[in-house]
Structures are given as structure tokens and as C-alpha cells.
Amino acid sequence: MKEKEIGELFKETFKDFKAQPSDELWTKISENKNLKAYNVRKKFLNPKTLSFTIGSVGLFVAALFYFISPETKLINQEQLPVTPEYLQTTLIDKDSACLNIQAAMKTEENNHVATSKTRVISTDTKSGEITHQNSSVNKDIADDSQMLPSTPVSITMIAPSTSQDEAIEEFIKPANLNKPTESNLLPIPFSGDPHSALLQYSRDTAVCKNSKVVLFVKNSLNVQWQIGVQATTLEIYPEESDIYYVDVLKPDGKDTTLAIRVDVFDCGLYIPNAFTPNGDGINDQFKVEAPMDITNFTLSIFETSGRLIFNTHNINKGWDGTYEGKKSPSGAYLYIITYTDRIGEKHYEKGQIVLYR
Amino acid sequence: MINEKEIIEGCKAGKEKYQKMLYQHFSTTLMGICMRYAKNTMEAEDILQDSFIKIFVKISSFRGEGSLEAWVRQIAVNTAINAYRKKVATGYDLDIDELQESIKDVKVSTTDKTTLNLLLNFINELPDGYRAAFNLYEIDGYSHKEIAEMLGCTPVTVRTQLHKAKLALKKKIETHLKNDLEVL
């Protein structure tokens, strides 16, 4: 099978692949608090709902105002009862603001433009004329101001312009804030913060042959070991010394290649397989040699029958081929050696030695 | 027949009824995508959930220029890749045992006999990086360069990963075929 065929096989198989998610998943999604908050906001800012609510409130206040005598209208502001006046101004503001929100939603323009539009309208209404004083007014605004003289024209005459502007701005806020808050809702896209941490990685290291080494790279955005593994850690059982190269994406976004050197030593014991306890000074003892520091050493020697005939914890002590003062006969014996090596790993070795006399 | 336009408008207004309709319409398609990009069903459902929330929140920016399906698919793929990148960055993907497991010969349960389930198993067992690259290139048809940008690595790395992914898949398939023959 060729590589290309594999690609094609999978492509063909998964082109229209569908799978059934579990039944609870929809509940999980619909109860997600970000989504719920989003839905509530959307409903509140829905242009139809908004204009309907405000429109009805507006009608109500306009009707209320109708019953206030014309004399009251012309009386100085300070003498007016506080509440109705406040209602009046907000009524106008809301009405015009509402239209503006619609316009803003239509054109998706920013806060600044929306606010300037409302200012234009408020000047228009204040002077009681429906004219376009601002030359930069666009068509939307023209439409809006033509729609204005339904109810509020007479009311606007007494509305103080400052509070009007304030009210407008205050009211417009949610509509214009809509955009940033919406993006706040989105799952935060992954981005490595360049200042959050420095790149860390394994030091050069020395280990026993075939023992486990875990090399790591921390705080990198992407880690690709050149031996073909993509993971932040690399577990190896090296047989010989080597340098491991790894491509990483540093926290500052730059690619770099690190080199981690792993030196491998032969930590195994030297265990002879035969000895000659004949007193000639050569190879008279069965003695184990360790190239490195080891601890918890135990050497036990058994006869083939299974009887323990020698036991020591001292690596420098060897077996001289005797048991209870008597020379053991030539033949095969068994040994068991246990020890802990320099890196704390426990070893257990057993085998056979031959005694020649 | 579902009126797509109506659903989009409903979703844009944040109405749950329409969101549910959209979910029902696309959940199986997107789950299919998520299953390919994830290691297991649990991971796939997490990605699917995130994808749908993203879809509902972002649908106001959907202009209707392409098809809705292409758009939601794109979001699912992007969400899956984001999840993968997050995993790499947080070092969550430390499970070396799993990685070695995946390199080892695959044991296929006898109940999953269909080719599709088998191949899906093979994909799921790939190391995350291989799986992402393989899915993006071979099945979803992105270019090497695009994938490199999505995964935050070089195009060369993408090629290497693709190559290795295919080798691993090939080995899995061959082992499987051999085992099958032995059984027979």
C-alpha cells in the first residue's frame, strides 16, 4: 500500500462521515452560561422588541403630557415638577436614541458616529425645525429626522439640551458596547503570552545504558523532536551517547533548535562466569565488579540443590569456593545479585557460575 | 425541509428554539469532524460543545457568502485545532505511555468490524500532532502552508508529520490485515 493510497482511502471513507453525539450534549450547550448571557443580551437589544417597548412607553408618556395644560409647558424649567420633566426628556431621548440604535445596527457604525448623529437630531428638535444643519449628515440621519415629528416636537422645546445629550449617551451605551462584550464571550483564542514564562528544557544528562530518560521542554508553543515526536516530553532508553535535537517555538514566537546531550555509560556489573580457587593467585575468588557506585548490594550463591552456601552485602568480598570450611566441589553454582544503582533503580540479576578446581 | 435563512435569523436574535434547530441539523456532521480530530469520544464532545457555542455567538458575523455548512465546518475544525494547540502548550499531552501505545501494533476489538470504525480507530490512536496534520491535509484539504500556520509550526514539520502519520497508519492497516489473515 502506498502513502498516496492511504490518503485517498481515508479521504473517501470520511468524506461524509457523521457521528451521533450523546443526548445530553444539547443540554450542556444550551445551559452554557456564556451562551445564555449572549441570548439574553441579544433579546434585549433586538431592534423590534426595543422599539416596541420604548414606543409604547413613549405613547403613554405623550398621552400623560397631553393632559398637562399648555401654560405649564411655557413655565420656567425650575418650577416644573421634577418627575414629569425627567420623563419627558428621557422619552425624547429614548425615541431618537432608538432610531439611532437601529441605524447603528444597520450600518454597524461605531460609537462615535452614533453619538454625533444623536447630537444632530437633538439640535434639530430643539430649534423645532426639521432641517439638516450638518452638511456631513448621511442619508440614515436624514431618514431619522424626517421620522421625528410624530409626537415629541412640542415637548422638545423645553428640554434642556445638556441632560438630553447625557441621557442619550447613557442609553446608547449598551448598544455600542454590544460588540466588545460579544467578543468577550467567545472562547479566548489560544495565544502564548510572550512574557509569561521562559523556555525551559532538560539539561545535558548522563545515564546508564538502556535506562529511562525523560527529556522535556517547558513553556514552548510547539515542540518537535527531530527523531519525529511531537510532545513536550520525550522518553528514551538510549543505548549510546547521543545529542537530541528539538525544534521549539519560543515564548516570544521565534523558532529555535535546542540540543540536549545524553551521555550513556555502561552501568552493569562485571560478573565472571567461572573461577578457579586453586590458590595460584589468579581468579581464586568469585567476585563481582561494579563500574559505578552501587548500594544495597547482595550476593547469594546457591548449590544446584538450592542450598544457600554464601551470602554477602559487601561487593568487595568474593566467594572463595568453600562452604563451612570445606572446599566445594567443581561444578555449576547459581548466584543471585541485587543492587540499587546510582540513579536509584533496583536491579536483580541471576545466573550460573562454574567452579573449576 | 428546514428554512436555513429563518434559522440563521433566529440564531442571530439569540432564540434558543432556532439554536436547537441548527444544532439538530448539523450536530452529526460536526460530530463526525470532531471524532476525527479528537483522541476519543469525550474529547470530541468537548470540541463539539465549544464549536456550537462559538457558532451561536459568532453567527451574527455570518454574511451568507458561502454555505452555512462550510462555515460551521470551518468553525469546528478551528475549534479542534485550538484545542490541540492548547493541549500542546499546557503540556497536557504528556502521556508517553499512550504515545508508545499508539506506536505499538494496534489491537482492534472484534466488535468494530466495519472499515470506517476501524480506520477511525487508527486515526484516534495517532499522536495528536500527526492526527491534526493528517486530518487537515488529507481529509479537509488544507495546504501545507495553511496547516503550518494553524498548528504554529513550519511547513517542513507539517510534511514530516504527514509522512509519519501515513507510515503509522500504513503499519496499523498492514498489521490488521495480517492478523485477519492469521485468524482465517
Image: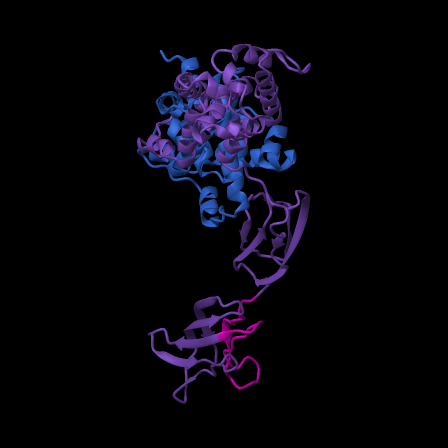
Q: Is residue B111 left or right of residue B74?
A: left
Chain identifier for the purple-coloured part of the image: A
In the rendered image, residue A234, in percent from the top left (x then y), is placed at 55, 51
What range is drawn magenta here? A267-295
Magenta stretch prevailing secondary structure: loop
Whether residue A308 is situated above or below residue A233 in the rendered picture: below
- Comparing B57 with B159, the one in front is B57
Chain identifier for the blue-coloured part of the image: B
- Let me know if residue A278 is in the magenta part: yes
Q: How many marks?
A: 0
- Comparing B171 with A230, the one in front is A230
Residue at 47% x, 72% y: name it: A339
- Comparing B173 with A345, the one in front is A345
Q: Residue furthest bottom?
A: A325
In the rendered image, residue A122, in percent from the top left (x then y), is placed at 58, 20
Residue B58 appears in view: yes
Residue at 68% x, 46% y: name it: A256
Q: Quadrant of residue A204?
A: bottom right
Whether residue A290 is situated above or below residue B152 in the rendered picture: below
In the rendered image, residue A96, in percent from the top left (x then y), is placed at 52, 19
